[in-house]
Amino acid sequence: MTSPVFDRIAEIIAENSEVPREKITPQAHVINDLGIDSLDFLDIVFAIDKAFGIKVPVEAWTQEVNAGKAPAEQYFVMGNLAQRIEELVAAKGAA
Amino acid sequence: MRLEYFQMVDRVVELGPDSISVASTVPMESPVFEGHFPGHPILPGVLMVETMAQTGGWLLLALNGLTRMPFLSKVGEAKFRGFVTPGAELTVGAKLVHDGSGYAVVEARIESAGKRVADAEITYRVMPFPAPELEQMMRDTARRIGLPGQA
C-alpha cells in the first residue's frame, strides 16, 4: 500500500521519463534504479513543485549528500522521497 | 544586436518584480543573412530562441543580484509565428513562471511592430558562476544594457 503522495510522484516520474509506472516502487532509487538523468529530474522536480505548491530543496539535499552529511538514499529512494515531499507539504500547511 | 557575438539584448526597457522587457534591433547586415537566406534574409529561429533565453536570463540575473548564472537547459513549446527581417525593432519580454531550487522557468516572447513573432517556455539551471571571467562579462554587459541596480 502506497500513499497518495507516493502515487502522485510516481505518476509524475512516469509522465516525465521513459520509466514505466510499474517499475517505480518505494524501494527504487531515482537515479541508480530508474535511470533518471539530470534533465529529466529537473522536469520532475518542476512538476512536483507545481503539483504540491512547494519548492523541493534539491540544492540543499545535493549539498548534504556531497558533504557526506546525509546518505543519498535519504532523498533519492522513492519511498523516502515521498516522505520528504509529505514533510514539505505539511510544513507549508503549518506555515 | 551583434549576432556574431551572441549579443542579443540591446537595452533593458523595464524590469518588474517578476518580469522584464528589453529592446533589440536586428542589424541590417550580418554574415548570418548571407546564408539564411540568399535573397530572403531572416533572423534564424535558433537566434530567436537565444534572444528569448538571454532576456529571461537577465530577468533571473536581476532577481538574484548577479550572484548566480542561469544556463539554458530546456526550450519548450517554441513557436516562430513570423519572419524577422534585418532592421526589425524587437521588444522581448520574459515572465518568471517558477523559481525552483537550482533551476527556474520563464515564459518569453518576441514582438515586432506590435505583433508576436515568437514565444517559448524556457528552463534554466541556475548555479554559481563557474568562472570569474564570465561573472565579470555579465556585470559589464549588465551595465551596457542598463540592467537596473547596476552602477
Image (tube, rainbow, N blue to C red):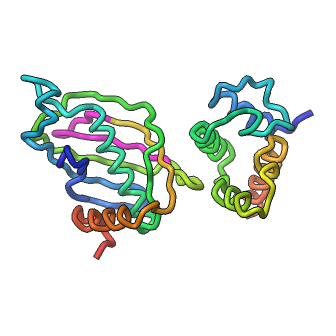
- Quarter of the image containing the C terminus of chain B? bottom left
Rendered location of residue A82, percent (x, y): 80, 44
The magenta stretch spans which residues? B105-118
Q: Is residue A66 magenta?
A: no
Rendered location of residue B2, percent (x, y): 17, 48
Instruction: Identify which residue is drawn at 38% across, 32% down.
Output: B78
Q: Nearer the viewer, residue B53 or B128?
A: B128
Rendered location of residue B53, percent (x, y): 36, 45
Instruction: Identify which residue is drawn at 44% across, 42% down.
Output: B122
Instruction: Identify which residue is drawn at 78% across, 39% down.
Output: A29
Q: Nearer the viewer, residue A57 or A73?
A: A73
Residue placed furthest toward the bottom: B151
Is B140 located above or below residue B57 in the figure? below
**Left or right placement of residue A4 versus residue A39 in this view:** right
Please identify the dominant SS of the magenta region: strand
Is A15 located above or below residue A38 in the figure? above
Is B10 located above or below residue A48 in the figure? below
Q: Is residue B117 magenta?
A: yes
Residue placed furthest toward the right: A1
**Left or right placement of residue A87 versus residue A48 in this view:** right
**Left or right placement of residue B133 versus residue B140 in this view:** right
Instruction: Identify which residue is drawn at 43% across, 45% down.
Output: B72
Rendered location of residue B85, percent (x, y): 13, 33
Is A27 located above or below residue B99 in the figure? above
Quarter assignment of residue B47: top left
